[in-house]
Image (tube, rainbow, N blue to C red):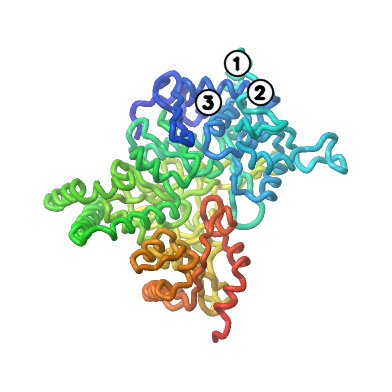
Amino acid sequence: MTTLLRLPGTHPAELTVPDLLLRNAQDHGALPALTWYAADGTATTLTWSEARHRVVEVAAGLAALGVAPGDHVLLMMGNRPEHWLTDLALVHLGAVPVSVYRTAAPEQIAHIARHSRAALAVVGDAEERARWEPLLAPPGGGPDGTPPTGLRRLVVADEDAVGPHTAFSRLPRPEDTSAVEESRRRVRAGQPVTVVYTSGTTGDPKGVVISHRNVILNGIALDKVTELPDHAAHICYLPFAHIAERMLGIYLPLLRASHVHLCADPAEVTTLVRALRPAQFFGVPRIWEKCAAALRTALDALPAGQRAALEEAGRTARAHLRCREEGRTPPPALEAAWEQARRDVLAPVLARAGFDRLVWAASASAPLPPGVLDFFAGLGLPVMDAWGLTETSGALTLNGPRAFRLGSVGRPLEGTEVRTAPDGEIEVRGVTLFEGYLRPDGSVEPGTDADGWFATGDLGRVDEDGYLWVTDRKKEMIVTSTGKNVSPALVENILKEHPLIGQAMVYGDGRSYLVALLVLDGEAAAAWAAGHGVDADTGTLAAHPGLRAEIDRAVAAANARLNRTEQVKRHRLLEQEWSPATGELTPSLKLRRRVIAARYRREIDGLYEDQV
């Protein structure tokens, strides 16, 4: 746990986010708070003292535009300093920042604008401005006198994209900011610190109301488990509309007085990791899958002697990790072998990816494929699965360096409880649980039962040592025509253990057997092509007989590990990778199963044709 930070006030449960920012400016004002990078790589950094000064300035400017306590303000700017500063400025006013995914569909943006009753949106560039302008209320209202939304004004961060709107750099800057300080003092821990709209795989997004108390108590509980160095750097690359990045990129850095590095383009995150060599790194499973695929490709090209040394070091690393996992002290011989393997073999490999100084490597959002977990364990890097929802203010269970079970999602954090219902659904309660769902009239609908329990929709079990194991989403379970229940995530993860399979979706609801849509991993496919003397792009490779035969063998190998009901009888290799931009994934990189099933209906139906 962070050791040198005092918590202002009388009790952590009464703290607010502005309290933490003030504490950081007073106690750690000279330390770096926020760094961002220009296109040419030039870095700009604000200290905690400078960051607070800028936040108060922005808050005063927003107040001059009419932002008042309780107002919802929409933000779509990507991971840039204006987003981070505006978010904190709004909570100083008692207003509520609502970040919107840049990949959100127009109808989702319109729904959020109407549902939140926001009058102001702060956007980044010309493309974002163009998406929001149609939602502005026209003078005099719409044809029937009622505007499509309540939006009245846009603030635009990019100077060349302002048009008729207010430029962020030209927000009013009153010399007297005492009104902001007075607003800050009136903010209470139980008030909303944000509303996060769930990305969802179906239906309209729900507005999850999260309080200052929720995020601060969650941060304190996380800090006790992760044991990070003081002021550890965080690479902020996931969208701020994702609860994980709000916790890791805003609220936890405030608690820890740590250094946030903004990564505007997620495609550049691996470059930034290599440059910074951070002590912590969080990635959703797809990020870890891509990292593993890239490292595997590099390691496969090593000379035979180096590969053999790496395999031996991997066996040592896994044996050492098993001792830690079981709470045993490694025997002296194993400890000595591990230290040598780490120093001479594994550290140089991890340094390739910038992971050689990691203390806490974490994943969440969906189960991490066992093959990816085992790959990193063999490099001496245990990736700690966590689990939580937007409604739990992020992680509610967590593996930590002192107590973990690889493959599980850890134990409940301090102040929280987990149980499973008779049908296996995970239920939770505790201090980090959200305040409820925002109603269109601005009131909040409770999301728990009378005893405070929230039904998560996830299925799992709690083992005898208190570790939670998540198996699937309750609504995503496949029920075949023979009445058998199948976890699609289980089958998909086994399929994706083959490096050539980057994405997979299993289908079979109401059918007599399972089929799968598969997508190639671009980097692994390129390496395969180079190794086989094939000059083709990923799309063309999907039709190459040799590669298709390799995929057939991968599916057969996966089936050998599954029971008969879980086995994939037929599969189709697709040419185009799925992404949020093309609609098959949510912004948090989860499968939109209904979208994929509808988009590839012909291919799925073809997999069932002429089959008994």
Percent x, y of residue 460? 45, 59
Q: CA distance from mark 2 to mark 1?
A: 10 Å
Q: Amino acid at mark 1?
A: Thr
Residue at left offset 36%, top offset 50%: 384
Neighbours of disc 1 within 10 Å: few (<14), some (14-19), many (20+): some
Q: Secondary structure at mark 2?
A: helix
Exactly how many numbered labels are in the figure? 3
Q: Is residue 406 left or right of residue 515?
A: left
For the N terminus, the image quarter is top left
Front-most of residues 335 and 546: 546
Residue at left offset 31%, top offset 56%: 298
Q: Secondary structure at mark 3?
A: helix
Q: Can residue 262 be seen?
A: yes
Q: In this rendering, which labeled residue sits more in front, label 1 or label 3?
A: 1
Q: Amino acid at mark 3?
A: Pro
Residue at mark 3: 18
Q: Which mark is residue 63?
A: 2
Q: Is residue 547 left or right of residue 105?
A: left
In the rendered image of this protein, does residue 451 appear above or below residue 259? below
State which quadrant residue 593 falls in. bottom right
Q: Amino acid at mark 2?
A: Ala
Percent x, y of residue 596? 58, 64
